[in-house]
Amino acid sequence: MFKLTGTDGSRFYSWDLVPGIYTIGRKQECDLQVPNQTISRFHAQIEAVADEEHCFITDLGSHNGTAVNGQKISDRVALKIGDVITIGAGEFRLVTEGESLPPTSRPTATRLSEVDPENSVYLSIDEALKPLPSKVTDLPDLFPAFSEMARMLVLHEPLQVMLEKSLQLVARVIPAERLAVLTTSEDKKEVYTTATLLPGGKDPGTFTLSRTIIDDILTEKRAVLVGDPASDPRYAQQQSIIISNLRSAMAVPIFDEGEVHGVLYVDSTNPAHKYSDEYLRLLATFGNIIASRLQNYALAQEREEKRVMDAELKKASLIQKKLLVSECPECRGYSAHVYQDQCRMVGGDLYDMTVLPDGKFLFLVGDVSGKGMGAALLMSNILASFRTLYGEETFDLARAIVQVSKQMFVFSNPGDFATLFVGLIDPLKNQLAYVNAGHNPPMLVSNEGDLRLLEPSGFMIGAFDYGDWQVDTQDLAAGDLVVVFTDGVTEAQRGEELYGEERLERLLIDQRQCPPDQICGKLVEDIVAFVEQTPQSDDITMLLVKRND
């Protein structure tokens, strides 16, 4: 029977592959789930065939591809025992029964000693990483081992392969019967055996290290040398054949750039191989090199996760743009124009315009609390909620605000809210009915140059499970201009100075005779000239509606 074993860099897996077809990916519906962001939801398919010496693997159109022994595949490929499969950040090996860890989707916990060895010597990591003494540097295999390990820093190979090779190189220089790389869970409560080098691949048994020593290595960044643990009578109670024969053991933090990535451990049962401070420093140097490689793996994974996130944000940005009206609807006697410039790929500013079945022209502008993806999701929810009400025979403005606010309150997190201005123009009466739910007061500029603010008539939506918003009305004369905007306009910044409402008012009064698109263009030019090289820190949205002469 086949087994598939491996790691995604943080967890270890081992699955039995009885004859059948298995999907592997990060979704729970997959037969072999690996919840890692670099792995597609349904990444690949593995087929185990009865009475065959091979399995078969097929990539399912994954983002990051599937590779076998370092070669990216595009078709169905046969797998043989020992083949290494790379899936995103996951690295797996096809083995036969008896060659892998017990079948589990969790790492194997390391068995630690329950007592602290008496004969222990500690060195701080700074002390352990000091230049090696000459009698150590004279070891014949030292520099070839260092050279080969340094070369691994630039090689692209599976993480598990790199760790196993590293232990083999350590064993060429430091005499040892057991070598292991140990890692911890995120909460530091469990210690896992990540890679081992053992005689004949046997069970590693119980390690000499106690939890106290492990905690000291991880938190205090100290290397430890345990001398002749077999002479400590307390170990006799552990009934461990390995420990009863041990003569020396060492453990050092796998340490780089202030961070401990794990523990490098070696021990020996040979009385001639009693470890010294010099060997402890040598092991610490190896641990430091391994840490540098692990850091490279982590950076590569971060880059890949960022690439995936950037791709998802790009898709989200396109979806958000599709949600917004691209062309202003025609309303008899009125012209309109809208402008939006987001400071991120997705944002929380929203707007909408539509002509309702009764001929009235509805327009709205909103600003959701927060920024980024969360604000964008709330923005799309508000738009969808309003649009379900547009088809009603008579659109009730006050009732619509209440319904949308309650919907947002129920299905969003505490503290999420949005400011909103909704206007409804009756072209037959030339009258504007509106609700200002805590939004920046829009500006109404008359043809004669008078300006008034459309002040809030209630608080923001989504903040509470109740609300009472007043509907105000305003007659619109020929040439009247309504400008609705978000705070990204008035709070555009140059140094400590804001663009401000006064600048906006002057420009609107000066440009009031122009069509809405020209007024908006002048306003954008003025904001750009004002901020100069200051980066944009908030979304900018403007919606202008004007009654034609």
Image (cartoon, rainbow, N blue to C red):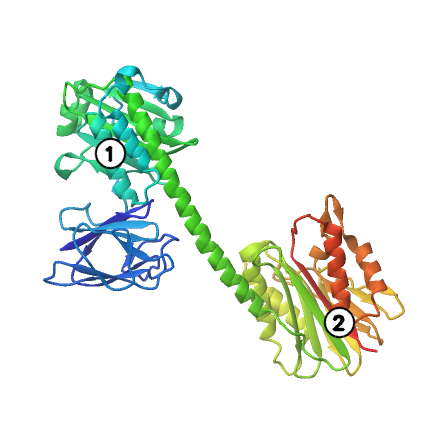
State whether residue 457 appears in this view. no
| Foreground of the two, 29 or 115 | 29
**Image height of 424 relative to 347, above or below:** below
Is 99 placed left or right of 260 in the picture?
left
Residue 185 image offset from top left, x and y in percent:
34, 40
Q: Circle 1 — which element?
A: helix
Residue under the image location 20 percent in, 50 percent down: 103
**Disc 1 to disc 2, C-alpha distance:** 72 Å
| Foreground of the two, 146 or 509 | 146
Q: How many marks?
A: 2
Closer to viewer: mark 1 or mark 2: 1
The residue where tag 2 is placed is 545
| Foreground of the two, 321 or 374 | 321
Q: Circle 2 — which element?
A: strand
Residue 125 image offset from top left, x and y in percent:
37, 23
Residue under the image location 25 percent in, 51 percent down: 69
Dot 1 or dot 2: first in sequence order is 1
Q: From this viewpoint, which residue is outermost toward the right?
A: 448
- Neighbourhood count class around disc 2 (C-alpha, 10 Å): few under 14, some 14–19, many 20 upward: many
Residue 20 image offset from top left, x and y in percent:
19, 64
Could you tell me the amino acid type at mark 1?
A: Leu
- Neighbourhood count class around disc 1 (C-alpha, 10 Å): few under 14, some 14–19, many 20 upward: many
Name which quarter of the figure residue 391 lies in: bottom right
Name which quarter of the figure residue 266 lies in: top left
**Image height of 379 relative to 174, above or below:** below
**Image height of 303 relative to 72, above or below:** above
Residue 381 image offset from top left, x and y in percent:
56, 66
Is 314 placed left or right of 365 in the picture?
left
Name which quarter of the figure residue 39 lies in: bottom left
The residue where tag 1 is placed is 167
Is 368 placed left or right of 41 in the picture?
right
Could you tell me the amino acid type at mark 2?
A: Val
